[in-house]
């Protein structure tokens, strides 16, 4: 920034004027700001006023001393002392023209820092493929993408990643819901599970599957049918999520799923690694991580009594995967309901021999939407939500992103 450059010049001048002013010790913070009126130049500083009492001289005398020691710089046309002791900088017109030419030549990347040789992964959104993105996901998407863009502009090599859970009970309930709607469309008796997904979008998914595959899944064994329809439905939901994010100006470099980690053996490997480190114990038929050793409020299960791994076990495998790829920093963008996960994830990283300071969790507060003056609860299972596509249709991508980013992520909206 020009202000920073001018502040450095003023500091150099003060160093040169130490003997003249009788100035010892550290220099104060130098503030340079755009001038409010054209006759006072392009930029000004009150450094002389701030130093006058310290050196026992009038502000104007201090300002004159600074001016006389200013190093030559092709940025500056002239410097004037004004008022009680302000230093006003007039910038050369041809320098400004050069800046404009450079801005046009660089286009959208004008002002970006040179690559710093460091890499960072930003993992965000990461909604499970059980339904379309709703407005509750919008703040995560806007915040995560803004962070990624800022880091790129600051010289980092950035990888945007979307991690999703496509296994376990939640996905099976989704699959059973799609299966019920599919069978209903074929005229068969079927009910969506009470704890399943009841939104109209499930009917649309079942209709799309029926259109593509006909009754191919109708007479296969029930468990196989549910699994096939679960996977067909999840694939379509994920395609829809990608399309919505594209409309929202968000594009990911990589997608990774919990199933990939399970099928590759990485989850089992993570549990073994924690066990070898001495932080795993068995109790009540389950396998646990001693996360209280790392500041968590209670120990966390890795493998349930039925032999199924927990989401946290997958999180541990994902940690190994992240560090194996050699990122210097890894950022998670999480909603406020994940605040309690910070200690256990960082604890697992430390237990497995990784540096937890390489991990950063950016926590954001939730957004409340009102309909007819009443809060709308975002629930995929109940089918009561406003989709992100609807928000984009209503106000547009730019307005939505700007509104979501204009408040601190620590503040509820």
Image (cartoon, rainbow, N blue to C red):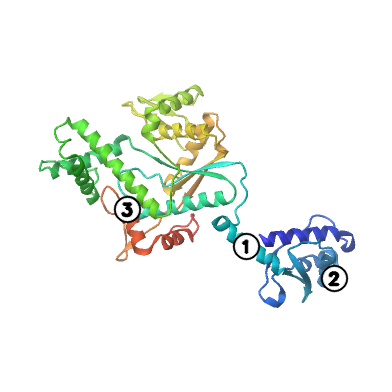
Circle 2: element type: helix
Asked if the residue at tag 2 contacts the one at tag 3, i.e. Cβ–Cβ closer than 8 Å, the answer is no
Left or right for 170, reference 11: left
| 14 over 355 or under it: above or below | below
Q: Is residue 335 left or right of residue 78?
A: left
Task: Report the side of 148 relative to 371 (left or right).
Answer: right
Q: CA distance from mark 2 to mark 1?
A: 39 Å
Residue to which mark 1 is pinned: 101
Please name the residue shown 14% across and 45% down the image: 185
Residue 61: image tag: 2
In the rendered image, is residue 155 in sight? Answer: yes
Residue 35 spot, x, y in % from top left: 68, 72
Is residue 18 rendered to the left or right of residue 274?
right
Q: Is residue 236 above or below residue 227?
A: below
Q: Which corner quadrant holds the N terminus?
A: bottom right
- Please name whichever residue, 276 or 211, is drawn nearer the observer in this view of the structure: 211
Give the image location of residue 216, x and y in percent.
17, 35
Q: Residues within 10 Å of mark 3 (few under 14, many from 20)?
A: some
Write the residue at 68% across / 62% down: 3
Residue annotated with mark 3: 378
Q: Residue at horizontal 41%, vertical 47%?
A: 125
Q: Position of residue 279 (x, y in %)?
A: 49, 26
């Amino acid at each position: 920034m020009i202000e920073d450059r001018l502040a450095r010049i003023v500091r150099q001048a003060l160093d040169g004027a130490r003997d003249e002013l009788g100035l010892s010790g550290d220099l104060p913070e130098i503030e340079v700001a755009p001038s409010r009126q054209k006759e006072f130049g392009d930029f000004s500083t009150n450094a002389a006023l701030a130093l006058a009492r310290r050196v026992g001289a009038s502000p104007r005398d201090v300002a004159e001393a600074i001016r006389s020691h200013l190093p030559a710089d092709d940025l500056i046309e002239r410097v004037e002392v004004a008022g009680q002791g302000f230093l006003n900088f007039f910038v050369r017109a041809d320098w400004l023209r050069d800046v404009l030419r450079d801005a046009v030549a660089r286009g959208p990347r004008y002002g970006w820092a040179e690559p710093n040789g460091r890499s960072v992964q930003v993992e965000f959104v990461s909604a499970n493929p059980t339904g379309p993105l709703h407005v509750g996901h919008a703040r995560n998407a806007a915040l995560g993408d803004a962070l990624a863009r800022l880091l790129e502009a600051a010289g980092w090599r950035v990888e945007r990643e979307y991690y999703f859970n496509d296994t376990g009970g939640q996905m099976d309930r989704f699959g059973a819901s799609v299966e019920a709607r599919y069978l209903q469309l074929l005229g068969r008796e079927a009910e969506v599970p009470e704890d399943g997904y009841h939104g109209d979008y499930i009917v649309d998914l079942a209709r799309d599957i029926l259109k593509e595959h006909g009754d191919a899944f109708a007479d296969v064994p029930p468990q196989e049918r549910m699994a096939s329809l679960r996977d067909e439905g999840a694939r379509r939901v994920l395609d829809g999520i990608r399309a919505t994010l594209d409309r929202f100006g968000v594009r990911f470099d990589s997608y990774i799923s919990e199933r990939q980690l399970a099928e590759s053996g990485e989850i089992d490997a993570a549990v073994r690694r924690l066990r070898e480190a001495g932080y795993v114990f068995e109790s009540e038929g389950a396998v646990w991580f001693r996360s209280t050793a790392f500041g968590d409020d209670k120990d966390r299960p890795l493998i349930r009594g039925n032999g199924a791994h927990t989401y946290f076990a997958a999180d541990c495998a994902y940690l190994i995967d992240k560090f194996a790829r050699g990122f210097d920093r890894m950022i998670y963008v999480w909603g406020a309901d994940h605040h309690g996960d910070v200690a256990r994830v960082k604890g697992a990283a430390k237990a497995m021999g990784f540096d937890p300071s390489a991990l950063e969790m950016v926590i954001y507060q939730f957004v409340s939407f009102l309909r007819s003056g009443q809060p709308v609860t975002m629930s995929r299972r109940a089918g009561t939500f406003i989709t992100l596509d609807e928000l984009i249709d209503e106000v547009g991508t730019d307005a939505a992103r700007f509104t979501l980013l204009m408040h601190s992520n620590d503040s509820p909206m």
